[in-house]
Image (cartoon, helix red, strand yellow):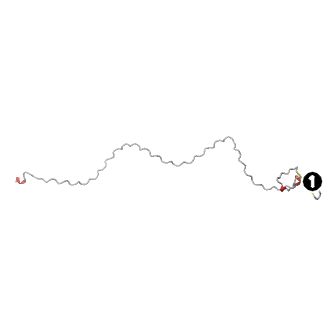
């Protein structure tokens, strides 16, 4: 026969089936009878508070289906920054000469030039005034 134990002393607990029973002895009357699960049930208590939410389950498999239509084209983006200046181009060909301009006005008179050298002393030869007197 199995050893009598309290429920708190059991190593393994199992649910009680509706057909399970236990023998109850009433020492006042000396009568023993079978008590089923229903005999031990009292009035149903109020529902307890809801427990915490369990963890989120794993992500489901990726679905497969046809690709939807292409969406509308987006708006034009903003203008980018101005680029750097390019290199200087080659020098162009020389142009043709223009017409001759008008003659300019006469300039001021220049300074007087330096005095020239003194001439040689004159000498007379031949007849003099006295010869005609």
State the SS at label 1.
Answer: strand
Q: Position of residue 58 (x, y in %)?
A: 71, 48
Q: Nearer the viewer, residue 17 or 104?
A: 17
Residue depicted at x 92% and y 53%: 33
Q: Which residue is mark 1?
A: 33
Furthest-top residue in this view: 66
Q: Nearer the viewer, residue 22 or 62?
A: 22
Residue depicted at x 94% and y 55%: 31
Q: Position of residue 128 (x, y in %)?
A: 7, 53
Q: Nearer the viewer, residue 36 or 107?
A: 36
Count of residue discs: 1
Side (left or right) of 19 relative to 61? right
Q: Position of residue 59 (x, y in %)?
A: 71, 47
Q: Which quadrant would the C terminus be assigned to in this image?
A: bottom left
Residue depicted at x 93% and y 54%: 32
Side (left or right) of 113 relative to 93? left
Q: Position of residue 10 (x, y in %)?
A: 83, 54
Q: Nearer the viewer, residue 14 or 84?
A: 14
Q: What crowding class fits label 1: few (fewer than 14 Cα within 10 Å), some (14-19), or many (20 or more)? A: few
Question: Residue 98 is drawn in which quadrant?
Answer: top left
Side (left or right) of 32 relative to 56? right
């Amino acid at each position: 026969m199995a050893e009598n134990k309290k429920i708190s002393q059991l190593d393994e607990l199992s649910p009680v089936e509706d057909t399970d029973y236990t023998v109850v002895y009433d020492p006042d009357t000396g009568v023993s009878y079978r008590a089923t699960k229903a005999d031990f049930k009292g009035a149903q208590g109020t529902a307890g508070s809801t427990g915490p939410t369990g963890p989120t389950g794993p992500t489901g498999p990726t679905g497969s289906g046809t690709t939807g239509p292409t969406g509308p084209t987006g708006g034009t983006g903003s203008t980018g920054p101005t680029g750097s200046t390019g290199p200087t181009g080659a020098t162009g060909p020389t142009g043709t000469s223009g017409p001759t301009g008008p003659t300019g006005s006469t300039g001021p008179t220049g300074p007087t030039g330096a005095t020239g050298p003194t001439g040689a002393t004159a000498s007379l030869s031949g007849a003099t005034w006295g010869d005609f007197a």
